[in-house]
Amino acid sequence: MAAVWLRAQDTPDDLLQRASAKVLATIHRLPKFMCVQTVDRRQYEPNNGIGGRVCEAQPMKKMRLTTSDRLRLDVAVSAGREMYSWVSEDRFEDRTLFQLVRNGALSTGSFASLLSLVFQGEVTHFTYKGPVTEGRRQLAEFEFRVPLGESHYVFTGDNARVTTGYFGTVKIDSTTAELAAIEVNTDLLPAETKACESRTNMNYSRVRLNNQDF
């Protein structure tokens, strides 16, 4: 009972450290595996008839959907490195995600790459925002920011490839210290990308691979 009580009194820093340790343990022992990744992409523009690149903040009700598509990719992960091919191709080639997908907006890979950036690479400081309830889960939300000078986060748009600063949030299960979600937002993007910003949302859960949990 004492152990349960102590665990319930975890500070936000304690919870973040426990979650980071679990994420890094997964990254460091990932087996070779393959899965299918589905990426839904949507591009919005202001609904006020103004042409060109308007990057002032706009509420979603004033935005209109201009393009959307879906990517279906086979992803192979080995030693923390990600390789991609289109679904049903019979082999993986030594191509990056950016070399494979030539058109439309794209950002740094969402598997081990994104987790490595946030939990063992560039993010050096998290700020606790507070508790969040989603369904029956009690989550703790933290925010972070990485300036351009320290960033390796890559975005491509309109055949332009740039490194950008970014910021976002992580949500952690307050009971199990499991990572629940990450949201990553780019800083204001350069004009050559023909985009203002990019937002990526990833939800995480435990899966079984080779009779182990990851």
Image (cartoon, rainbow, N blue to C red):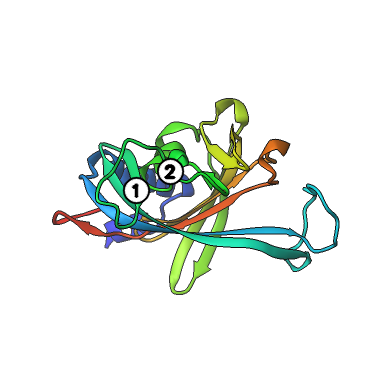
Q: Nearer the viewer, residue 39 or 69?
A: 69
Q: Which mark is residue 42?
A: none
Q: Position of residue 137 (x, y in %)?
A: 43, 69
Q: Position of residue 34 (x, y in %)?
A: 26, 52
Q: Earlier in the sequence, mark 2 or mark 1?
A: 1
Tell me if mark 2 has few (under 14), some (14-19) or many (20+) residues whose alpha carbon lies within 10 angstroms of its own.
Answer: some
Residue that label 1 marks: 85
Residue that label 2 marks: 100
Residue 190 visible in this rendered orientation of the protein? no
Q: Position of residue 86 (x, y in %)?
A: 36, 52
**Pointers 2 and 1 in contact (C-beta within 8 Å):** yes
Image height check: is 132 above or below 105?
below
Image height check: is 152 above or below 210?
above
Q: Which part of the image, by quadrant, shows the N terminus?
A: bottom left
Numbered disc 1: secondary structure: strand
Instruction: Tell me which amino acid carries mark 2.
Output: Leu
Q: Nearer the viewer, residue 159 or 161?
A: 159
Is 78 on the left or on the right of 61, as rendered?
A: left
Residue 86 visible in this rendered orientation of the protein? yes
Q: Nearer the viewer, residue 178 or 214?
A: 214
Query: What residue sits 28% from the left and 46% below the top?
Result: 76
Q: Quadrant of residue 60?
A: bottom right
Q: Residue furthest bottom?
A: 135
Query: What residue sits 33% from the left and 41% below the top?
Result: 82
